[in-house]
Image (cartoon, rainbow, N blue to C red):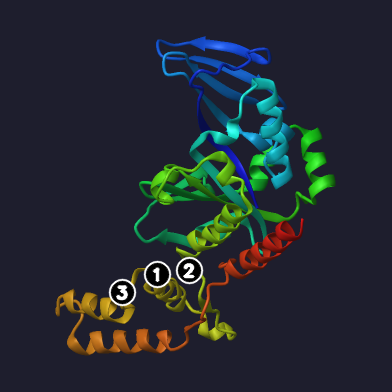
C-alpha cells in the first residue's frame, strides 16, 4: 500500500530555491515550469509573483521508473532528496491532491473482476476500455476518485522489458497471474479530511493508517455482482435460468424486485397475444426457474477480506519499524 501521484504547494515567503537541478521547460504569464529529472520527471512550477512553487508527479515513477511498489521509506528518501536539491523544506507544503492505493492479486481475470463491480452510491461511474476489453473503472464524486484497473496491462504495455524484469525479480510480479490496482485519488484533500493537509502530516504513521482504512472503506462502497450460487445440475441451467441469474444479481445491486418486474411486464402484453392462462403459465415457469437460483452472502468478486488482511499486516509492520 503506497502513495503515488502528488501535488504540493510550498509558499516560499522570503526564501528562495535552488534551480541547479531543474531543467526549464516552458514560461507562462504566471509561472515557469521546470522538470526535475529522475527515472521519470517531476514538474516544478515556480510563481515568482506569489512566492510559491508547485511540485507535481509520481514519486514512485521518479525514484524507480514504475509504481508497482514503493515503500514508506522510499517516499521519505525521495522528499529528503528533493529538499536537498531544491534547498527548501517541502514537508511544510500543503498537499493539493494525492493518490493512495494498493495492488492485489485476484483469483480471476481482470476483465471478469471489473465487469462485476457495478456502482458506488453517490458517485458517478465510468469505464475504461481498450477495444472490447474492459481495463478499468472509476467512481467519482466532488472530492474523491476511486479507480480500479488492470495493473499488469500497464506494466506490459508501458514499461521497458528491463523494468518488467526488475518488478518480477524484486517484487514478485508474475505476468501469468492476475492483478488489480485499487487507487483513491483525493482530488480535494481539504474537503475530504476537513482541513488542509501538510506533507509532514500525510507521511505520519497515524495518517497513513487512516488512509489504509479509508481505502478499504471506499472499496467496500462499490456494489458487486457475482452473488449467485451456480446450480450444480446441468438441467437447472437452461436458456431461461441464465438471464434470471443475471437479473437476480442486479436485483441485489439496484434494489428492485425481479419477480414483480417480470409480472408487471407480463400484464402489459395484450390478451390477443397472451391469454390470462398463457400469462399464468409463463409466470409459473419463471417462478420454477427462480427457485433454482440461490444467492450467497458475499460476491465471489469481493476482495474486502484480502484487503483487510493486507491492511492489518501493513499497519503492524509499519508500527514495529
Distance from label 1 to label 3 (Cα)?
A: 8 Å
- Residue 10 appears left or right of 121: right
Q: Name the residue under label 2.
A: 225
Within 10 Å of disc 3 (Cα), the crowding (few <14, some 14-19, many 20+) is few
Above or below: residue 81 compared with residue 146: above
Quarter where residue 277 is shown: bottom left
Instruction: In the rendered structure, find residue 253 and report the number of the disc placed on it.
Output: 1
| Residue 198, visible in the rendered structure | yes
- The percent coordinates of residue 294 (x first, y second) are 49, 84
Q: Which of marks 2 and 1 is nearer the N terminus?
A: 2
**Looking at the image, which residue is at 68% across and 30% down?**
62
Within 10 Å of disc 2 (Cα), the crowding (few <14, some 14-19, many 20+) is many
Within 10 Å of disc 1 (Cα), the crowding (few <14, some 14-19, many 20+) is some
* Secondary structure under the numbered disc 2 in the rendered image: loop
**Looking at the image, which residue is at 73% across and 36% down?**
77
- The percent coordinates of residue 22 (x first, y second) are 64, 15
Do the residues under discs 1 and 3 have CB atoms within 8 angstroms? no
Above or below: residue 82 compared with residue 202: above
- Residue 129 appears left or right of 286: right
Instruction: In the rendered structure, find residue 256 and report the number of the disc placed on it.
Output: 3
Residue farthest toward the front in the current orientation of the protein: 14
Please tell me which residue lies in front, 72 or 122. 72
Amino acid at each position: 500500500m503506497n502513495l503515488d501521484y502528488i501535488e504540493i504547494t510550498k509558499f516560499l515567503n522570503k526564501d528562495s530555491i535552488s534551480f541547479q537541478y531543474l531543467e526549464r521547460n516552458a514560461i507562462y504569464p504566471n509561472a515557469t515550469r521546470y522538470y526535475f529529472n529522475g527515472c521519470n520527471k517531476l514538474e516544478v512550477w515556480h510563481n515568482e509573483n506569489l512566492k510559491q512553487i508547485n511540485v507535481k508527479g509520481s514519486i514512485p515513477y521518479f525514484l524507480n521508473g514504475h509504481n508497482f511498489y514503493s515503500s514508506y521509506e522510499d517516499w521519505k528518501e525521495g522528499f529528503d532528496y528533493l529538499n536537498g536539491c531544491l534547498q527548501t523544506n517541502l514537508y511544510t507544503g500543503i498537499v493539493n491532491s494525492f493518490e493512495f492505493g494498493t495492488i492485489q492479486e485476484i483469483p480471476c481475470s481482470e476483465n471478469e473482476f471489473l465487469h462485476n463491480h457495478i456502482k458506488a452510491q453517490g458517485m458517478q461511474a465510468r469505464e475504461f476500455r481498450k477495444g472490447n476489453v474492459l481495463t478499468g473503472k472509476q467512481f467519482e464524486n466532488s472530492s474523491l476518485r476511486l479507480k480500479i484497473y488492470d495493473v499488469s496491462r500497464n506494466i506490459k504495455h508501458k514499461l521497458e522489458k528491463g523494468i518488467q524484469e526488475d518488478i518480477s525479480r524484486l517484487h514478485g510480479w508474475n505476468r501469468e497471474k492476475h492483478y488489480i490496482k485499487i487507487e483513491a485519488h483525493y482530488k480535494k484533500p481539504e474537503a475530504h479530511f476537513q482541513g488542509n493537509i501538510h506533507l509532514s502530516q500525510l507521511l505520519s504513521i497515524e495518517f497513513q493508517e487512516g488512509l489504509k482504512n479509508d481505502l478499504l472503506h471506499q472499496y467496500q462502497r462499490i456494489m458487486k455482482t457475482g452473488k449467485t450460487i451456480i446450480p450444480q445440475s446441468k438441467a437447472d441451467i437452461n436458456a431461461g435460468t441464465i438471464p434470471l441469474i443475471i437479473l437476480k444479481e442486479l436485483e441485489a445491486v439496484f434494489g428492485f424486485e425481479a419477480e414483480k418486474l417480470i409480472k408487471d411486464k407480463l400484464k402489459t402484453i395484450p390478451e390477443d397475444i397472451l391469454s390470462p392462462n398463457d400469462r399464468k403459465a409463463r409466470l409459473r415457469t419463471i417462478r420454477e426457474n427462480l427457485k433454482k437460483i440461490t444467492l450467497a452472502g458475499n460476491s465471489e468478486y469481493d476482495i474486502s477480506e484480502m484487503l483487510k488482511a493486507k491492511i492489518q499486516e501493513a499497519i503492524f509492520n509499519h508500527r514495529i519499524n
